[in-house]
Image (tube, rainbow, N blue to C red):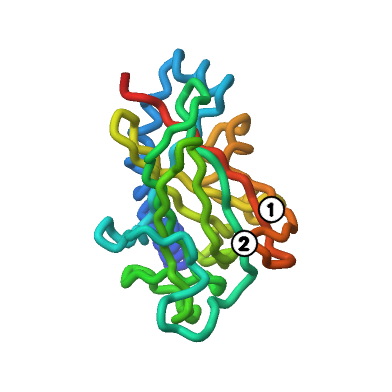
Amino acid sequence: MTLSNLELPLRRTAMKRDSNRRQFIKWGAGAAGALALFSPFSKALAETCGLTPPQTAGPFFPGEKEFHPDTDLTYIAGHSKRAKGKVISVVGRVLDQNCKPISGAAVEIWQACASGRYNNPKDTNPAAMDPDFKYWGEDFTDDNGRYRFKTVIPGAYPADVDWTRPPHIHFKITKLGFHELTTQLYFKGDPLNDKDYILQKIPEHQRDQVIVEFVASDHEGEIGTLTGKFDISLKSIR
């Protein structure tokens, strides 16, 4: 059976859209490998202590050399203006599979600015960049496993012709003796969450572990700042 002149362009368009989607999702190959760590024993631990589901780092990871201890993404040294967007605080603890705090863990985050644009040459989004936004930061957990960041709510952005990624923040956590974890934080109540191909790949019973509710607080003395608690659980190598 042959395709008509009308059907051929439609088929090519559909194939291109599927290819684009696969191209974006393929960045999650590393996360897929990490998912293999979830043996039946690991699954039992996840149900009791909430092991954080791994997710893709995406195509916009800035590179390890870009990370330096800096927990405030809303200001850049030497700039007089603050980053655009709604200021938020992300706080939480890094725990092991037995719910014990992990001290000295490196917590790296990277994200889009309020317009939905990343500071990365691979990002072809035409949205404006924010010259006053830091785009990534790093913290080290204290003796109680605690970390914190000040940032802004990232904007949504188009990942394909029929796919808009919801606001999210990428996390990478490393600590000697533990499996490295890359995951993403999502904002509770955002309507795009239910349509996101990456978030929906997480089993439904685990999605609440990466969807965070942000509530008004006076964190760090700033009235009206939204604060969200995002606890992260790693699996020890032994």
- Label 2: state its secondary structure: strand
Classed neighbour count for the residue bearing mark 1: other residues with Cα under 10 Å, few (<14), some (14–19), many (≥20): some
Give the farthest residue toward the top.
41
**Label of residue 88 in the image:** 2
Give the percent coordinates (x, y) of residue 14: 45, 58
Tell which of 203 and 176 is nearer to you: 176
Residue under the image location 40 percent in, 26 percent down? 235
Give the percent coordinates (x, y) of residue 80: 50, 86
Q: Which residue is mark 1?
A: 214
Residue under the image location 50 percent in, 55 percent down? 169
Tell which of 217 and 112 is nearer to you: 217
Residue kind at label 1, given as amino acid type: Phe
Give the percent coordinates (x, y) of residue 134: 43, 70
Q: Is residue 22 left or right of residue 88?
A: left
Q: Quadrant of residue 229?
A: top right
Residue kind at label 2, given as amino acid type: Ile
Any part of residue 171 in sight: yes
Q: Is residue 32 left or right of residue 83?
A: left
- Label 1: state its secondary structure: strand
Give the farthest residue toward the left.
65
Image position of 128 with respect to 120: above or below: below
Give the percent coordinates (x, y) of residue 159: 47, 62
